[in-house]
Image: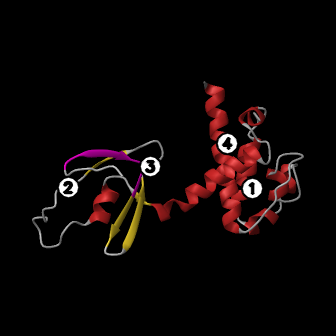
Amino acid sequence: MLNLKPGMKCYAKNLSLHIDGNEFKYAASRGKKFAVILMSDEKPDNADGIHIDEFLRNCGWVPASEELAITDIIAERQRQITAKGWTPDHDDEHVNDEIAALAALYAMPEACRDWPAEETGYGANWAEAICPNGWVAKFGDRRRDLVKAAALIIAEIERIDRAGA
């Protein structure tokens, strides 16, 4: 175990505080880390003590439990790459917004998918009109569909970034 003394600095991406039998987990935003300054053993000047949750949030930390959606989106994007083979090279072949269209389809509320769309010439309903030709959407529950949509949006943004580089 590393022995830190009051006033020493350490840098962290994750922080776990144990206070009165409760554990509070915080995580730094993506690509960031924070300096954590250990305070001395002295009591704070005010009677309320230190409002650690408010302090950490003001410094940019978020409770780790609030990052569940982001974690699920990143895991889904990794699944798309490893299980489906939708690698950056594969994505780069889709230059006509197909990835964004599939993301829009997954993000679309289920009831909207059946709205008439014959006038578009691309399908009888919105789902058929938006889904890229030859592609198939596999719908799940609402949250799962939104996670897929978000992961596809990330893939499309990354594709655009690579094309602009």
State the CA–CA distance, disc 2 to disc 4: 43 Å
Along the line of sight, the residue nearer the viewer: 48 or 110: 48
Q: Position of residue 149 (x, y in %)?
A: 68, 54
Residue behind mark 4: 155
Which residue shows up at 76% across the image and 50% down it? Answer: 102
Q: Position of residue 164 (x, y in %)?
A: 62, 26
Q: Which residues are magenta?
A: 7-15
- Kindly indicate whether the residue at mark 4 contacts the one at mark 3 (C-beta within 8 angstroms): no
Along the line of sight, the residue nearer the viewer: 155 or 27: 27
Left or right, residue 60 beside residue 107:
left
Report helix, strand or loop for mark 4. Answer: helix
Residue behind mark 2: 39
Q: Amino acid at mark 4?
A: Ala
Q: Main secondary structure of the magenta part?
A: strand
Front label number (3 vs 1) = 3
Q: Is residue 108 visible?
A: no
Q: Position of residue 51 (x, y in %)?
A: 25, 66
Q: Sequence order check: which comes first, mark 4 or mark 1?
A: 1
Q: Sequence order check: which comes first, mark 3 or mark 1?
A: 3
Residue behind mark 3: 29
State the CA–CA distance, disc 3 to disc 4: 20 Å
Along the line of sight, the residue nearer the viewer: 125 or 46: 46
Query: In this rendering, is residue 59 above or below 141?
Result: above
Furthest residue toward front: 1
Instruction: Answer whether residue 12 is magenta in the image.
Output: yes
State the CA–CA distance, disc 3 to disc 1: 29 Å
Query: In this rendering, is residue 31 above or below 93?
Result: below
Q: Amino acid at mark 1?
A: Leu
Which of the 4 image quarters holds residue 24? Answer: bottom left
